[in-house]
Image: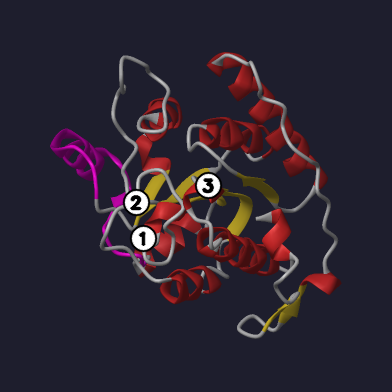
Amino acid sequence: MRHLSDALETYSPTLDRDLEDASLLDLGDVPLHGAVMTEAQRRIADAAEHAARTARLAVMLGGEHTASYGGFRGVQRVHPELALLQLDAHLDIRASYAGQALTHASWVYQLGTQLGFERVFQLGLRSGERSEWHFARAHTSLSSAELALPTSVQAELGRRPVYLSVDIDVLDPAHAPGTGCPEPGGVTSRELLRFVDGLGELRIVGLDVMEVSPAQDPAAITAVAAAKLVREVILLSAFY
């Protein structure tokens, strides 16, 4: 994503904003090699907190979606009323997965039990266990297959700082083949960018774009889509 961002223009014609007018700082990679889950999450949270204290928008690129748990918790230290807006093909709201409480399939459940599920808003969903769908519909503020925010939900989110977590598999595999769990029936890159460009009323203070797997996409279609998405959110949030 870093490499391919160099191929993109700094200017967004949709937003009429330019990265040349913003201050950007790359804080580098979080060293996770050899760390067990609890230690890895601590390092991620500390790095996300540092980014949130340093900049108006903290951005994390990855990577296994479990990292979003630490990213959210770190940004939440700076913005205690933080809400989660998740764009994802999968609900990720199982109580546990493969015998583990915190995984890529259960991180939203772990956050929700600590924050309150009224802070969880999920869009683009099209895959999950039956029990996940029943739980999400009963407990979250919004769990929808559509990539659209009802006016009432946008108003609710507008009262809070927002952490936007994007699993790249929200895109159809034709637009993002380089991901671990591709799920047919997703949106196009254009539809995702159009949705994100319409979030100008929200105060997005944290962003992650996760599950980009370059080894599964030699043409780098997935990474360049992710890079452009990051550009748009930076431009959207840098000038609010």
Q: Are marks 2 and 1 in contact (CB under 8 Å)?
A: yes
Question: In this picture, is 181 found above or below 217?
Answer: above
Q: Is residue 13 left or right of residue 151?
A: right
**Image quadrant in which you'd find residue 92:** top left
Which numbered marker is on residue 215? 3
**Residue located at (19% from left, 42% from top):** 133
Nearer-N-terminus badge (2/1): 1
Q: How is the image coloured?
A: secondary structure
Tag 2: amino acid: Pro
Magenta stretch contains residue 179: no
Tag 3: amino acid: Ala
Quadrant placement of the C terminus: bottom right
Real-space CA distance between mark 3 and mark 1, rounded to the nearest whole angstrom: 15 Å
**Mark 3 element type:** helix
Residue 81 image offset from top left, x and y in percent: 56, 41
Which numbered marker is on residue 173? 1
Tag 1: amino acid: Pro
Query: As rendered, which of 52 and 188 lies closer to the eye?
Result: 188
Stretch of the chain drawn in magenta: 127-148
Which label lies toward us, 3 or 1? 3
**Residue located at (58% from left, 64% from top):** 229
**Mark 1 element type:** loop
Real-space CA distance between mark 3 and mark 2, rounded to the nearest whole angstrom: 14 Å
